[in-house]
Image (cartoon, helix red, strand yellow):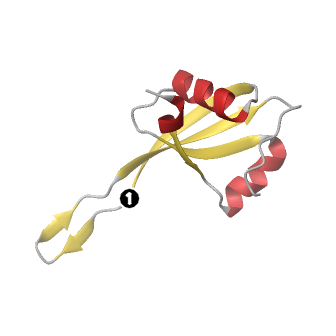
C-alpha cells in the first residue's frame, strides 16, 4: 500500500490539539494499515522521526432506519509520538 493512501486525514479535536504540545499527533488511517506501515508513512510524508505508534479501531453506533438496524462504520485512528526535535504543522 502506498504511503499517501495509508493516512487519510489528521484528526483535529480539542483533545488532539492539546496532545500536540506533547509531540503526539492523531490521524485517521486505513483500517488495513499496521503500525509499521503507519510509522513509515508518517516519516516519509512529514519528514519526521516517529518514536511510537498506538492504534485503535473505532466503530460508530448502530442506527435504526425504517427498514431495520444499520451497523455503524468502522474506522482506525493512530496516535503517533514524535522525537522531541520534530514537529508537524497541521493547523496551518
Compared to residue 53, the image places residue 56 above or below, namely below
Which quadrant is the C terminus positioned in? bottom right
Local SS, label 1: loop
Q: Quadrant of residue 64?
A: bottom left
Count of marks placed on residues: 1
Q: Position of residue 80 (x, y in %)?
A: 66, 36
Look at mark 1 in the image and give the residue it sits on.
60
Q: Position of residue 38 (x, y in %)?
A: 56, 30
**Which residue is at a point 42% across and 48% down the rendered structure image?**
75
* Towards the viewer: 11 or 58: 11
**Which residue is at a point 18% across and 66% down the rendered structure image?**
69
Which quadrant is the N terminus positioned in? top left
**Which residue is at a point 83% across and 48% down the rendered structure image?**
21
Q: Quadrant of residue 53?
A: top right
Q: Position of residue 49 (x, y in %)?
A: 76, 25
Q: Position of residue 39 (x, y in %)?
A: 61, 26
Amino acid at each position: 500500500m502506498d504511503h499517501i493512501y495509508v493516512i487519510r486525514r489528521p484528526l483535529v479535536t480539542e483533545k488532539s490539539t492539546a496532545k500536540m504540545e506533547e509531540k503526539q499527533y492523531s490521524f485517521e488511517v486505513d483500517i488495513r494499515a499496521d503500525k509499521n506501515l503507519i510509522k513509515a508513512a508518517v516519516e516519509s510524508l512529514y519528514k519526521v522521526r516517529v518514536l511510537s505508534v498506538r492504534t485503535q479501531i473505532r466503530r460508530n453506533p448502530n442506527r435504526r432506519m425504517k427498514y431495520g438496524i444499520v451497523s455503524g462504520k468502522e474506522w482506525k485512528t493512530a496516535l503517533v509520538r514524535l522525537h522531541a526535535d520534530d514537529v508537524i504543522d497541521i493547523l496551518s
